[in-house]
Amino acid sequence: KWSDWTDFTKCSKSCEGGKKSRAREQNFQLRETPSALVPGYTLLGPGQCQNFYQTTKDADAASPEACAKTCSADVQCSFFSLNLGVACNKYNASVGECELRPRGQSSHKSYRKEQWTQTFGYELNRNQKCTKPRAEKLALKEARAVCSADEKCGGLYDSGCLGSAVLCDGFGNDTEVGSCMHRKVEIGGGETCTGNAQQVEDCNIQLCPINCKMGDWSAWGECAPSCNGTETRSRPILQEARNGGTPCGETVEQKPCSKICVDCRWSDWSAWDTCSASCAGGLYSRSRYIAVQAEGPGKKCEGNSSEIEACNTEFCPSDCETSSWSQWTDCEPYCNGTQNRSRVIQKPAADGGAGC
């Protein structure tokens, strides 16, 4: 009888097709049959059981299957009688019905172990301790072969259930948590297990995720513009992400920058100076100077350091101009008369000038 399957092992690969496996073991199970024939044993006729050395005290164990299991696990046992569950190592067919001495009680059914059917199986019992372990540890498959060929070996002891074991010549009732005991039992003419002891399946057949792969960053570019500008660098994508892999990061980075740059700055304009003429168009000027010189790629000062403009462009006032007075004329009439003189207006007054 096969044991239950173990849990599947961890997949050998995380993606693109790995393998996982699970295993099971062949355990001994007596065939249930209503006949007197127990697998591996022959029902004998009347006779006597001699040199019996073990009595099964548990009434529930007094059955052909239970006695056969006890006898099969014991290399000294060659016969067993059913009624009292007694294992015997001798049987005398000439004395009639098997009698269990010295008590004189009879056993009506006795069974002989068939030596030619000595095929062994191993029944797994967990948390059981071996009282007589041997020293050499072997792989489980090798240990079974060695134990099956050794009459003294009663089974295999694997202290951690790790798949390797030592041969065990004796079992007690002590428990040991985490151990695996493989009791050797004779399966005689029973049916062998069909199928495989190991099962392998494909697992994690999905494609492996491919993470994005990016090249190195380039050097930072020139600061543009030079004053309060930005520098830029970039990196290429060498491999795009696929199948759920880590996506690519940014391909361009920028950071603020500024070289040493001072813009030129003019001073304020001075006041206009005095006009060069009070009328008819004069000139006056004003000036400024560079208060802060430009540095680095800073802006240069534009424009002139002085300005000249026309002033008092209105016409000047022109006064009236006359000729000189003429001579006085003779007195007419001579007595109590008058004398006259005259002058000529040479330029009349203009633009607010003094009149004639």
Image (tube, grey):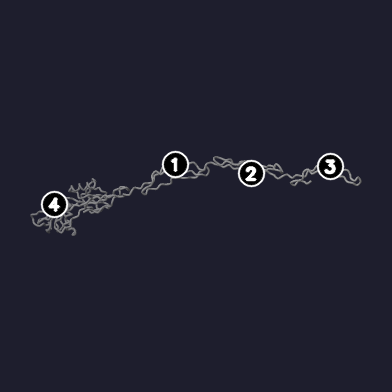
What is the three-letter code of the residue carrying label 1? Answer: Ser
Asked if labels 3 and 1 touch by Cβ distance under 8 angstroms, the answer is: no
Question: Can you tell which of label 1 and label 3 is closer to the viewer?
Answer: 3
Asked if labels 1 and 2 touch by Cβ distance under 8 angstroms, the answer is: no
Mark 4 to mark 3 CA distance (whole Å): 189 Å
Whether residue 160 is visible to the viewer of this picture, yes or no, is no
Asked if labels 4 and 2 touch by Cβ distance under 8 angstroms, the answer is: no
What is the three-letter code of the residue carrying label 4? Answer: Glu
Above or below, comparing residue 97 to residue 290 in the picture: below
Marks 3 and 2, the one that precedes in the sequence: 2
Question: Can you tell which of label 2 and label 4 is closer to the viewer?
Answer: 2
Residue under pointer 2: 269
In this view of the protein, which residue sits in the foreground, 279 or 122? Answer: 279
Total marks in image: 4
Residue under pointer 1: 218
Q: Horizontal and vertical percent for residue 272?
A: 67, 44
Residue under pointer 4: 114
- Secondary-structure class at tag 3: loop
What is the three-letter code of the residue carrying label 3? Answer: Ser
